[in-house]
């Protein structure tokens, strides 16, 4: 059976939701960052990691989402098969990996971004992270003008957005204020019964 290694509320929430949307049998295993169990399947010690029944392992959230969408075309979660639709899916996957997710690092781990151990220096790094996240939220919000889903139809990319939107709500002062389209995407996803099921499971 397909196995997902996840940590509650982390970016692994995205493939967790997607596996539930797909509806095929899978199991999910809660792991600690850098734990022995996780290091055994991903030397980077990070989530998400996917393991297939034959032992094949895949990490990197964007790759896992793309793989799941391609493995289960019947779920209709790829965003489309034309050259341009595939390019748009790659574009937004890269946006979430390299721009949006990366914007949170200074907030999560400010000590990595300054050699000054003082609180003031760390606070400055965190605030720089807030500004970076707001920039990415602005780009996403503008893109969502007049459309419900990031690729024009519900796809794995909407699931990718969800954990990061939740981090923005919790960790950035004023959260999604001024980003009504992102708020609407969040609310649409939060109202989904499969999403609620996964949030409950991750919280337990
Ligand atoms: N580029 C990786 C980043 C994965 C990643 O850093 N995940 C975070 C959770 S959102 C994590 O596991 N952090 C713990 C760590 O790196 O020790 C991906 O997109 O999958």
Image (cartoon, grey):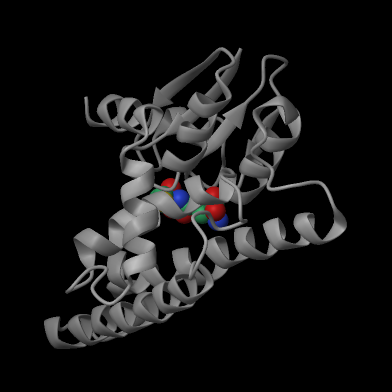
Against 122, residue 175 (above or below) is: above
On the picture, is 24 further left or further right than 27? right
Against 82, residue 180 (above or below) is: below
| Quadrant of the rendering where the N terminus is positioned | top right
Residue at figure coordinates x 45%, y 27% from the top left: 37
Residue at figure coordinates x 73%, y 15% from the top left: 54
Q: Quadrant of residue 94?
A: bottom right
Residue furthest out toward the right: 83
Residue 76 position, x and y percent, is: 67, 34
Q: Quadrant of residue 183?
A: bottom left
On the picture, is 4 further left or further right than 11? right
Residue 44 position, x and y percent, is: 53, 48
Residue furthest out toward the front: 146
Residue at figure coordinates x 37%, y 31% from the top left: 31
Q: Quadrant of residue 198?
A: top left
On the picture, is 114 further left or further right than 21? left
Residue 118 position, x and y percent, is: 15, 84
Residue 72 or residue 119, whichever sits in front? 72
Please indicate, yes or no, whether residue 3 appears anywhere in the rendered image.
yes
| Quadrant of the rendering where the C terminus is positioned | top left
Against 199, residue 93 (above or below) is: below
Residue at figure coordinates x 63%, y 40% from the top left: 64
Residue 150 position, x and y percent, is: 55, 58
Residue 110 or residue 89, whichever sits in front? 89
Against 37, residue 160 (above or below) is: below
How many numbered badges does the structure rendering display? Answer: 0
Residue furthest out toward the left: 119
């Amino acid at each position: 059976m397909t196995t997902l290694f996840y940590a509650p509320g982390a970016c692994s929430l995205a493939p967790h939701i997607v596996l539930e949307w797909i509806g095929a049998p899978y199991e999910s295993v809660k792991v600690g960052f850098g734990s022995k169990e996780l290091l055994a399947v991903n030397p980077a010690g990070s989530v998400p990691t996917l393991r297939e029944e034959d032992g094949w392992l895949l990490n990197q959230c964007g790759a896992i989402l793309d793989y799941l969408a391609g493995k289960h075309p019947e779920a209709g979660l790829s965003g489309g098969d034309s050259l341009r639709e595939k390019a748009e899916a790659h574009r937004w996957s890269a946006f979430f990996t390299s721009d949006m997710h990366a914007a949170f690092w200074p907030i999560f781990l400010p000590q990595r971004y300054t050699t000054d151990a003082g609180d003031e220096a760390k606070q400055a790094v965190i605030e720089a992270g807030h500004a970076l996240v707001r920039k990415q939220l602005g780009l996403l919000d503008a893109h969502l003008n007049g459309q419900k889903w990031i690729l024009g139809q519900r796809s794995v990319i909407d699931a990718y957005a969800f954990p990061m939107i939740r981090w923005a709500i919790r960790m950035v002062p004023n959260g999604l204020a001024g980003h009504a389209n992102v708020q609407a995407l969040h609310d649409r996803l939060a109202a989904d019964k499969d999403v609620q099921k996964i949030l409950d499971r991750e919280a337990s």
